[in-house]
C-alpha cells in the first residue's frame, strides 16, 4: 500500500504515473471530501489518465490513511497537501478539491500559487461552517460513537447525495457501495476530521489572492453546502467560472460523473490551448 510521509503523518495515495507513463499534459491532484477517500474520483481518473498524470490521496485518518499521530486542523491539511505536491514533484498541478478538499485547494491557491496551475472547486465554500450545522454534525458524531456509523447511514446519505441519485433504481449497486463505505468508518479518526471541518477558519478574505484559472462545479441539489454559498465563493475569485451540475447533490463526482468529466476536459483543453 503506497504511503507517503508528509508533515508528521502518513498519507495513502494512488498515482497513475506507474501505469500510464506516457501522459502528455500537466498532472492533476484530487482531494476528497469528509467521510470519503480518493476513490470518489475514480470516474474522473479513468477519464483523464490517458493525458494527465492523476494522483489522489486520502486525508490523514480517512480512507486508507492511518490515524493522525497528533491533533490537526484545516491548516494542517493544507500543509499536508503542499508537502505531498513537493515530495511527489507534481507542481504546478491542476488541483481538484471536493468539499473538504476544496477548503484545502483554496488555501493552496491563495498561499502557495507556485504549486497550483489551476483550481477546480466542487461542492465547497469559503465561509465558516454555518452555526446551525455544527450541533447537527456533532450530534451525528456522538451517535456514531454510541451506535456505530452503520446505524446512521440513512441520514448521512441524505446529506451527501441528491434526490435523483438516492431514488434512481439504476444506481442501487453504487448506492450500496457508498453505504458500505459509510458503515465501515472508524469513529475516532472520523471525529477528528469532522472537528477540523466544522472548526475551520473562513478563507473568504484570502480569495482575492487567487490568480490561477478557477472552475467551480456545484450540485444543484446540494443540501450540505447550498448553492448561494458556492456562488459567493466563485464571485470572490477573479475570473472564476461557476457551473451548476443538474441532478447532483454534495457528491457530483459520483452522482453525475459524465457531466463532471465533460466540464473538466473542456476546462483543461482551454488552458492547453491558451498556453
Image (spheres, rainbow, N blue to C red):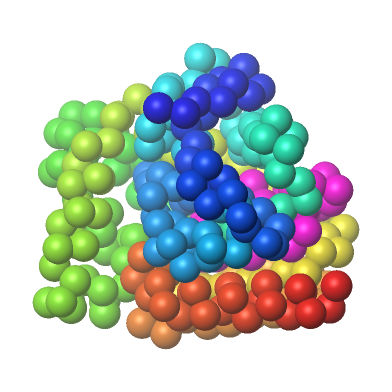
Q: Is residue 100 visible?
A: no
Q: Give the residue drawn at x 34%, y 71%.
A: 255
x then y, percent, for residue 63: 38, 37
User: Along the line of sight, which residue is nearer the eye, 260 or 272?
Assistant: 272
Which image quarter: residue 186?
top left
Q: Is residue 113 magenta?
A: yes
Which image quarter: residue 70?
top right
* Total residue callouts: 0
x then y, percent, for residue 127: 65, 58
User: Along the line of sight, which residue is nearer the eye, 117 or 154?
Assistant: 117
Q: Is residue 118 magenta?
A: yes
* 30 on left or right of 126: left
Where does the magenta region start and end? 98-125
Which quarter of the rendered picture does the N terminus lie within? top left
x then y, percent, for residue 148: 17, 34
Looking at the image, is 171 positioned above or below residue 30? below
Looking at the image, is 268 positioned above or below residue 106? below
Q: Give the residue drawn at x 56%, y 25%.
A: 4
Q: Give the residue drawn at x 78%, y 51%.
A: 92
* 248 on left or right of 265: left
Furthest-front residue in this view: 22
Which quarter of the rendered picture does the C terminus lie within? bottom right
x then y, percent, for residue 206: 81, 54
Q: Give the residue drawn at x 53%, y 52%.
A: 20
User: Along the line of sight, which residue is nearer the eye, 104 or 28?
Assistant: 28
Q: Is residue 201 visible?
A: yes
Amino acid at each position: 500500500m503506497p504511503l507517503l510521509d508528509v508533515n508528521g503523518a502518513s498519507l495513502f495515495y494512488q498515482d497513475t504515473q506507474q501505469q500510464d507513463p506516457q501522459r502528455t499534459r500537466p498532472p492533476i491532484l484530487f482531494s476528497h471530501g469528509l467521510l470519503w477517500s480518493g476513490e470518489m474520483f475514480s470516474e474522473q481518473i479513468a477519464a483523464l489518465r490517458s493525458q494527465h498524470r492523476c494522483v489522489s490521496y486520502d486525508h490523514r485518518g480517512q480512507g486508507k490513511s492511518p490515524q493522525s499521530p497528533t491533533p490537526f486542523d484545516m491548516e494542517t491539511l493544507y500543509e499536508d497537501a503542499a508537502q505531498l505536491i513537493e515530495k511527489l514533484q507534481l507542481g504546478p498541478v491542476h488541483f481538484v478539491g471536493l468539499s473538504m478538499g476544496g477548503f484545502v485547494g483554496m488555501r493552496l491557491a491563495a498561499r502557495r500559487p507556485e504549486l497550483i496551475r489551476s483550481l477546480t472547486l466542487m461542492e465547497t465554500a469559503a465561509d465558516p461552517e454555518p452555526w446551525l450545522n455544527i450541533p447537527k454534525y456533532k450530534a451525528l458524531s456522538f451517535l456514531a460513537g454510541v451506535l456505530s456509523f452503520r446505524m446512521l447511514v440513512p441520514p448521512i446519505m441524505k446529506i451527501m447525495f441528491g434526490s435523483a441519485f438516492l431514488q434512481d433504481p439504476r444506481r442501487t449497486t453504487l448506492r450500496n457501495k457508498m453505504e458500505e463505505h459509510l458503515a465501515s468508518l472508524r469513529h475516532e479518526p472520523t471525529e477528528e476530521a469532522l472537528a477540523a471541518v466544522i472548526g475551520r477558519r473562513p478563507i473568504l478574505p484570502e480569495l482575492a489572492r487567487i490568480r490561477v484559472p478557477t472552475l467551480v462545479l456545484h450540485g444543484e441539489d446540494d443540501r450540505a453546502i447550498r448553492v448561494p454559498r458556492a456562488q459567493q465563493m466563485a464571485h470572490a475569485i477573479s475570473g472564476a467560472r461557476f457551473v451548476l451540475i443538474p441532478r447532483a447533490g454534495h457528491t457530483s463526482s459520483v452522482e453525475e460523473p459524465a457531466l463532471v468529466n465533460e466540464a473538466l476536459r473542456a476546462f483543461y483543453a482551454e488552458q492547453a490551448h491558451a498556453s
